[in-house]
Amino acid sequence: MLKKLLKYDLKWIFKLLIVFYSIAIVFSILTRILFSIDNSTVFNILGQICSGVTISFIFSILINNIMRCWARFIKNLYGDESYLTHTLPVNKKTIFISKFLTGIITMFASVLVILIVLFIAYYSKENLEWVKTSLNILATIYNSTIIKLLLIIFLVFFLEMVFTIFAGYIGILLGHRSNDKRIVKSIIYGFITYMATQTITLIIMFICGLFNKDIMNLFMTNNIVNIDILKIIMYGAILLYTVYIVSYYVIGLKIFKKGIDVD
Amino acid sequence: MNFNNDRPIYIQLLEQLQVLIVSGKINSGERISSVRDLALEYKVNPNTVQKALQELENLGLIYTERTNGKFVTSDKKLIEKYKKEFAKEQVNNYFRNMNSLGFTNEEAINYLKGDK
Amino acid sequence: MNLLECKNICKDFGKKKVLKNINLIIPKGKIIGLLGKNGTGKTTLIKLINDLLVPTSGEILINGKPVGVESKKIVSYLPERTYLDKSMKVIDVIKYFEEFYDNFDSKKAKKLLKDLDLDLNSKLSKMSKGMQEKVQLVLVMSRRADLYILDEPLGGVDPATRDYILDTILSNFNEGASVIISTHLISDIERILDEVIFIDKGKIILTSDTDTLREKENSSIDEIFRRMFKC
């Protein structure tokens, strides 16, 4: 049953995202081509425009992915369609897992597409050097190490996005426990959930900083960063976000299993 | 057929089936449609049909053959008896209505004969 | 065992008490009318039976078991609103029902849709509300269920369609199954009912066999209802 539910959930979300993916990829290719033509102001300007479009579509992918996950959650579990969803001979838990997996799978696909788009449009030695300087990393580090680091950063980013989707789910679940102004309350609860968890992150970071000068330096100064410390922080972030995501799942499931009142 | 919602539907259905039998529209010995078909035909609940058929069976107008369904009795005398009973009822109704208009029974009979 | 049993059901929305101590038993093989004016708790009761609401107190048993996966397998429910994903085509929805319900008869559904001149390839969003409602009725009646729950199946349809819907219900419900029909349009439907349940202000105020009630009061259910709830 999970497979069947997941199929319909994913279909609904990807139906729109696929369009955004395609456009982003097309423009990334255009950007690449236009930038690779040397010494032409016209092409350079066109390249800048395409580059802008590519970047804006990257943001569209992210925002749409998140919003559509939330929309599906509300429509399918509380809206008119919920009359069908909740009367299917399927466990509540299965329905819930499907929604969580949908968030993870769609976001994974989106981050992957974004990586590909960035790679097509911008991958070059000069740009890697630029990344190094902007991250304040010692310039002698090998490029392959930087790429690894970037991939880890993307993994953290992926988890952060999934975390955002799930914080929204929790907000929706809490907001829909009351009998009126459910959407407004969902937004408020979602925001509170998100902020509360991020505050915990900051506190944990700060506590770590008290014991490790290098971590504190990362926040307090503009000094050149030790890449190993950066990695440790990223691993810490991966651990933290995983813990958050799992707790959101457990809490969400608990609320959901108690049963819900649809409109 | 239109049922009158004021009276129990099964009684109206019973009357209807009785008329069909005594008038010969359903022949003596003939098989009666299934409950489900009758329910669809008269657009009523199958349980209502069941009840009406049960009454018919109690009256002896139909009987059940275990596997084949329900049949109209082959006892023609019985059918004839019910036919007369219904006729009598109609006549009584006629007199009652004429009485309420101020006719005596005799006047009512003469009225039918054409002596106005 | 009773098909459906509601024991002391109460449902509050905040301070508003919508259902007050409902006790109800539905046996097998009956067509039952759940009759009441709008906003008296009919839909709330039906939603509770279908796990769309959680009772504030009380217990609902279907075939002796609490509401859950097993009960959903044998209950076929027609809500009073359109509940299908409107971006789907009729044929997609049939596939959807086929996938999720073991007792769904897609051949029957296709035949009924054909009878109604509904095109399998048209998108739900392109169909009128009335057409969508017909599609839903077909889907619900094409399941071989033990209990059909139809919430206002006659609301807002023309008399011809009304007859067709009653026919569809009568000719398609599974033998031995029960049907609960909630409505405020009593005269159209009363001849097919075995039993009636009158509900008002969140309480059940009368349950009776229809013919017994007619005999006792010497009038139609519709009239009895009107007399009882005279404004």
Image (tube, coloured by chain):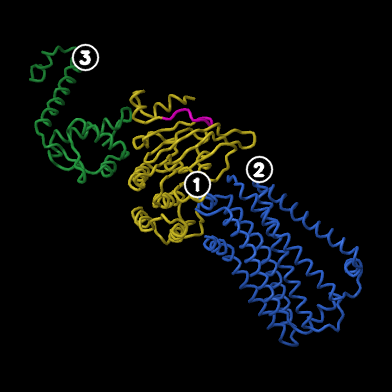
Kindly identify the amino acid type of the residue bearing the numbered disc 2: Ser
Badge 2: residue crowd in 10 Å (few <14, some 14–19, many ≥20): some
Give the CA separation, mark 2 to mark 3: 68 Å
Residue assigned mark 1? C81
Badge 1: residue crowd in 10 Å (few <14, some 14–19, many ≥20): some
The verdict on residue C57 being magenta is: no
Say which quarter of the image contains residue C181: top left
Residue assigned mark 2? A178
Main SS of residues in magenta: strand
Residue assigned mark 3? B100
A224, C50: nearer the viewer: C50
Chain depicted in green: B
Placement of the N terminus of chain B among the 4 image quadrants? top left
A31, A231: nearer the viewer: A231
Kindly identify the amino acid type of the residue bearing the numbered disc 1: Arg
Vertical placement of residue B63 versus A90, above or below: above
User: Given contact means CB atoms under 8 Å apart, are the residues at marks 1 and 2 in contact?
Assistant: no
The lab-note entry on whether marks 3 and 1 share a chain reads no
Point 11% across, 37% down: residue: B74
Q: Does residue C168 appear left or right of residue A238 in this picture?
A: left
Point 55% across, 64% down: residue: A11
Q: Chain of mark 3?
A: B
Q: Chain of mark 2?
A: A
Q: Secondary structure at mark 1?
A: loop
Vertical placement of residue C104 versus B27, above or below: below
Q: Secondary structure at mark 3?
A: helix
